Structure formats: C-alpha cells, structure tokens
Image (spheres, rainbow, N blue to C red):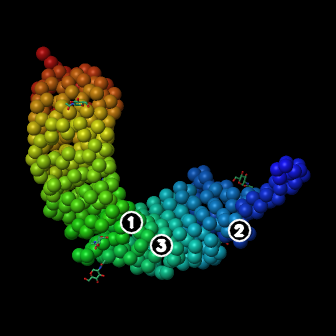
C-alpha cells in the first residue's frame, strides 16, 4: 500500500485549504508597505490615461498584486517597476516616503519625464537596493555624493541632464556590476584606474558627457568586463585593454585617437568581440597583420582618416560603416561575397576609385547601400536581386552607361539617388513608382520624371 492511497478526500481538502492560506499570506503585503506605496502614488504626477500600473493601485486590491509591485514571502516590497508610466514632475524626496521600504531591491522609474534632482533618500534610505534605474528622464543637478547602499549592483542614470562630477561613491561600490551614466552633462576628469578595484564590474558606459577620461600606463581592468562604452570622452590615447578576455562591446567613438588601429584590438574578448565603434577619431589605418574576429557583427570605422586597402570584414558583419575616410583604393573584387549577412554598408565620401564589383549582387541582405561621393567609374552593376534594399545611394560618382531596368525589381526601395554621375539613356519607366528618386546632374539621361524627352 502506498501512502498516497490512504489519503482521504477530507485531508486533501484540508491540505488545499491550508496551502491556499500560505499562498495567500505569501502575497499579502504589510500594512505599512501599502501605506508607503499609496503615499508614493499620491506624490507622483502621472497621466492616468497612459499609466498601466499606478492607475490600478487602490484599496480594493491587495498591494502585492498591484502592477509593478513584487513582494517577498513576508509581505515586504522587493521590486518596484514604474518604468514607462508617464510620470512627470519631481521624484518624491521626503524621507518618510522611502524609509520603510527596507527590503526594496529593485527600483525602476526609467522612461518617464521626471524632473528635478536625484533625491538623497533614494541612495541613502533603501538599504537593500541592488538595482536603480532612472534612465530616460529629465533629472538634473549634481549626483549627490553620499554613502549609497552597499549592495548596489546596477546603476543606470543614463539619458538625463545630470551635471557635475562623477560622484566618488561609485568607486566604493564593491558589488557594482553595471554603471550607465551616458548622455548626461557630467563633467570633469575620470580616472579609469579607479574602476580597476571593482571586482564585479561587467559593463561601463560613460559616453556622451563632457568628461575627460584618463588612465595610467599600467592601467588594466578586471578581466570579466563585458562592455566598455566611452564615446565622446576626450580620450587622446587608447587604453590598454589587452587583458579584457571577456569583452564583447567596445565603443571609443568620437575621441581624439590617432595612429594605426593596433592589431591587438581584434583579439579582445579572446576573439569574441561583437561590437566595435571607433568612428569619429583620427585613425590612419589598421596595423598589419590583422585578423578580424569571426563573430564581429557591428564594425563602425566611419569618419576617420583611414588610407589604403579597404579592410575585408568578417562574414557575420551586419552593420559596416567605412564612410568619410580617405582610402584612395578600390573595392576588392569579391567584397560582395563577404557581405551576405550585411544589412547596412556605407563607404560614402571615402575617395574610392575603380568599379563597383559585380559580387555586390551576392550581398543579398542589404537594406542600405551607400557608395555616394566617391570616384567610382564603370556601370551600375545588376543588383535587381537585392530584394530587401530600401536605400541605394550612388550619387556624386563617375558612373556611366544606362540605368539597368533590373532596378525596378527592388520592391522595398524607398530612396534611390543616382544624381551627379555620367549616366545616359532613358530612365526605366518602372522606376517612377518609387518615391525618393534623384537623377539630377546626369546630362545624358532622358524621359520622365525628367523634363528632357528622349529622341
Ligand atoms: C505625499 O503623500 C502623503 C500621504 O499620502 C501626503 O500626506 C502628502 O501631502 C503628499 N505630499 C505631496 C507633496 O503631495
Ligand atoms: C481598483 O483597481 C482595479 C484594477 O487594478 C479595478 O478593477 C477596480 O475597479 C479599482 N477599484 C476602485 C475602487 O477604483
Ligand atoms: C600602476 O603603477 C603605479 C605606480 O607606478 C601604482 O601606484 C598603481 O597601483 C599601478 N596601477 C595598477 C592598476 O596596477
Ligand atoms: C594581463 O594578464 C596577465 C596574466 O593574467 C598579467 O600577467 C599581466 O600583468 C596583465 N597585464 C596588465 C596590463 O595588467
Ligand atoms: C558609433 O559612434 C558614433 C559617434 O559616437 C555614433 O553616431 C554611431 O551611431 C555609432 N555607431 C553604431 C553602429 O552604433
Ligand atoms: C556569387 O556567389 C556565387 C555562389 O555563392 C558564386 O558562385 C559567384 O561567383 C558569386 N558572384 C560573384 C560575382 O562573385
Ligand atoms: C541625392 O544626392 C545628392 C548628392 O549627394 C544630394 O545633394 C541630394 O540631396 C540627394 N537627393 C535625395 C532625394 O536624397
């Protein structure tokens, strides 16, 4: 006889009642937590017609069941997600408002229109806080330098108007994993070496502020860092990142970096680098020999001063921007064969000469192809098979011959710019169905939409 067969229906009933009670109590929030949340609601300005969470916070429902609220088994609020709730005005700043949420681990007020400063209680009165997300608001003023919760792991203050220095408490957060301060108005110097002590650091984003980032000659971060985003950080030199064996994303765009792009950069992350943005610097070339990492899928080298051979990207690249450089060379014959997965390719305004290789036909995933403002000669290749192409810009080159009728097969095309070339003959009438056409500056072209008729 197995124990379960002796289970009487009344015991089963008792059990389900008993466990039902437990589940019920597990989601019952404590009275003082409820009072705090209701006063928070009272003190937040939001548009009820756009709110999906706050609007439903009322006495009829149990507060752990309110939208955006998560409790632990003791009825304390642990997570509060009020992102995208159309919040405006200041974040409630009175002590009484926050004190008492002692188990709160996660607080997000991101993607709202909150203004005013970052209230001190948020950093000082929430002892359990691990994740604070205030990104995409209009918060301003200095980030107070107080002693924040020791457990703070993820701090996202990006896309606000914070000003003043990066507060010193950051470097004391032993558990800090993700720090995003990008797109604010922070200023002053930041010494990258100070981040070297943060043993849990995983992602660092200081981009788009008014910061000046510096580092010592022996600088090295801990090796588990996954993403380093330091765009617009007034950097004059490349930091030594050779030991970053886990790095997947690196953005050093819009700095003052010059010379050759060192070949160790391609070995970052043990060859697993996925995203590299070195655009808007003054790099003159790529140190040889180099091998691109196989997994690289975003490579942005635009607006530098790169000269010489056009680097052949790895086959997985989906965003490839070589525009605004100074190559003075031609596109390699088989180039299109490596762009089979590429959605975006631009090499506009880069002193490219020679013909457009026929292999571009094989870049069949392209949505944007921009070869404008170069010295390209020869014919427009047959690319009617690029079914996803939305934008084709071949303007300001020296392309000749007629416009291939095949282009009318490009069903997704919304912008076609062939202006300022040496094209001639009748414009294929099938093209006229497209919007965003430009043909001016080709003396030999005729037929609609041009006024000049063909004879
Ligand atoms: C904040 O909420 C409390 C409790 O609901 C209320 O007494 C107080 O007036 C509110 N403060 C503001 C500024 O709305
Ligand atoms: C309380 O909110 C629930 C939904 O969250 C709603 O169905 C109910 O009508 C509200 N009750 C009152 C009294 O506003
Ligand atoms: C770099 O070297 C200086 C002295 O040369 C030393 O004080 C500092 O701790 C070193 N930094 C690192 C990250 O090793
Ligand atoms: C890189 O790591 C190696 C081995 O882990 C270590 O010997 C070396 O000092 C590190 N380099 C830097 C610049 O920290
Ligand atoms: C690279 O950086 C530049 C300047 O910071 C930015 O405009 C561009 O969008 C970035 N490229 C990618 C692919 O994110
Ligand atoms: C396009 O790709 C096919 C097969 O993948 C290959 O045989 C052909 O030579 C390529 N075309 C050009 C012009 O390179
Ligand atoms: C076409 O290209 C020319 C030259 O690059 C530019 O001036 C013009 O604005 C473009 N036209 C359209 C419709 O994009």
Query: Is any atom of residue 93 visible in this view?
Result: no
Q: Is mark 2 within 8 Å of ligand 2?
A: no
- In the rendered image, which residue does mark 1 sit on? 224
Query: Is any atom of residue 200 visible in this view?
Result: yes
Q: Position of residue 276 (x, y in %)?
A: 29, 55
Q: Position of residue 208 (x, y in %)?
A: 33, 63
Q: Residues within 10 Å of mark 1 (few under 14, many from 20)?
A: some
Residue 438 falls left or right of residue 125: left
- In the rendered image, which residue does mark 2 sit on? 74
Q: Nearer the viewer, residue 359 or 212?
A: 359
Q: Is residue 440 above or below residue 85?
A: above
Q: Which quarter holds ligand 3? A: bottom left
Q: Is residue 246 above or below residue 312?
A: below
Q: CA distance from mark 3 to mark 2?
A: 25 Å
Q: Position of residue 405 (x, y in %)?
A: 23, 22
Q: Nearer the viewer, residue 289 or 320?
A: 289
Of the image marks 3 and 2, the number of the one nearer the N terminus: 2
- In the rendered image, which residue does mark 3 sit on? 175
Mark 1, mark 2: which one is toward the viewer? 1
Q: Is mark 1 within 8 Å of ligand 4?
A: no
Q: CA distance from mark 1 to mark 2?
A: 35 Å
Q: CA distance from mark 1 to mark 3?
A: 14 Å
Residue 436: numbered disc: none
Q: Nearer the viewer, residue 422 or 454?
A: 422
Of the image marks 1 and 3, the number of the one nearer the N terminus: 3
Which residue shows up at 33% across the image and 62% down it?
A: 245
Q: Is mark 3 within 8 Å of ligand 3?
A: no
Q: Residues within 10 Å of mark 3 (few under 14, many from 20)?
A: some
Q: Nearer the viewer, residue 416 or 200?
A: 200
Q: Position of residue 135 (x, y in %)?
A: 46, 62
């Amino acid at each position: 006889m197995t124990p379960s067969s002796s289970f009487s229906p009344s015991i089963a009933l008792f059990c389900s009642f008993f466990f039902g009670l437990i589940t019920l109590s597990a989601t019952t929030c404590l009275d003082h937590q409820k009072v705090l949340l209701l006063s928070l609601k009272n003190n937040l300005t939001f548009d009820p017609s756009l709110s999906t969470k706050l609007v439903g916070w009322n006495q009829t429902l149990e507060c752990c069941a309110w939208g955006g609220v998560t409790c632990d088994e003791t009825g304390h609020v642990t997570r509060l997600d009020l992102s995208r709730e159309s919040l405006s005005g200041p974040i409630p700043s009175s002590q009484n408002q926050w004190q008492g949420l002692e188990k709160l681990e996660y607080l997000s007020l991101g993607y709202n229109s909150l203004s005013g400063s970052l209230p001190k209680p948020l950093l000082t009165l929430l002892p359990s806080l691990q994740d604070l997300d205030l990104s995409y608001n209009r918060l301003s003023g200095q980030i107070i330098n107080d002693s924040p919760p020791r457990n703070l792991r993820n701090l996202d203050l990006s896309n606000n108007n914070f000003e003043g220095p990066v507060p010193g408490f950051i470097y004391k957060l032993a558990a800090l994993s993700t720090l995003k301060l990008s797109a604010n108005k922070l200023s002053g110097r930041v010494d990258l070496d100070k981040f070297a002590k943060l043993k849990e650091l995983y992602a660092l984003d200081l981009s788009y502020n008014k910061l000046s980032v510096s580092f010592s000659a022996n600088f090295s971060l801990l090796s588990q860092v996954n993403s380093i985003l330091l765009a617009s950080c007034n950097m004059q030199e490349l930091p030594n990142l050779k030991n970053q064996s886990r790095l997947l994303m690196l953005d050093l765009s819009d700095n003052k970096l010059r010379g050759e792009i060192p070949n160790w950069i391609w070995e970052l992350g043990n060859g697993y680098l996925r995203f590299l943005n070195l655009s808007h610097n003054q790099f003159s070339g790529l140190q040889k020999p180099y091998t691109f990492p196989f997994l690289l899928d975003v490579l942005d080298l635009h607006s530098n001063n790169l000269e010489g051979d056009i680097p052949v990207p790895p086959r997985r690249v989906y965003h490839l921007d070589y525009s605004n450089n100074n190559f003075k060379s031609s596109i390699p014959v088989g180039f299109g064969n490596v762009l089979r997965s590429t959605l975006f390719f631009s090499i506009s305004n880069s002193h490219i000469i020679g013909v457009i290789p026929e292999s571009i036909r094989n870049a069949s995933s392209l949505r944007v192809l921009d070869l404008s403002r170069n010295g390209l000669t020869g014919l427009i290749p047959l690319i009617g098979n690029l079914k996803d192409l939305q934008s084709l810009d071949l303007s300001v080159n020296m392309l000749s011959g007629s416009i291939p009728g095949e282009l009318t097969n490009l069903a997704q095309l919304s912008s076609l710019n062939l202006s300022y070339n040496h094209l001639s003959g009748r414009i294929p009438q099938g093209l006229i169905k497209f919007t965003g056409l430009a043909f001016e500056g080709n003396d030999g072209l005729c037929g609609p939409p041009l006024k000049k008729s063909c004879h």
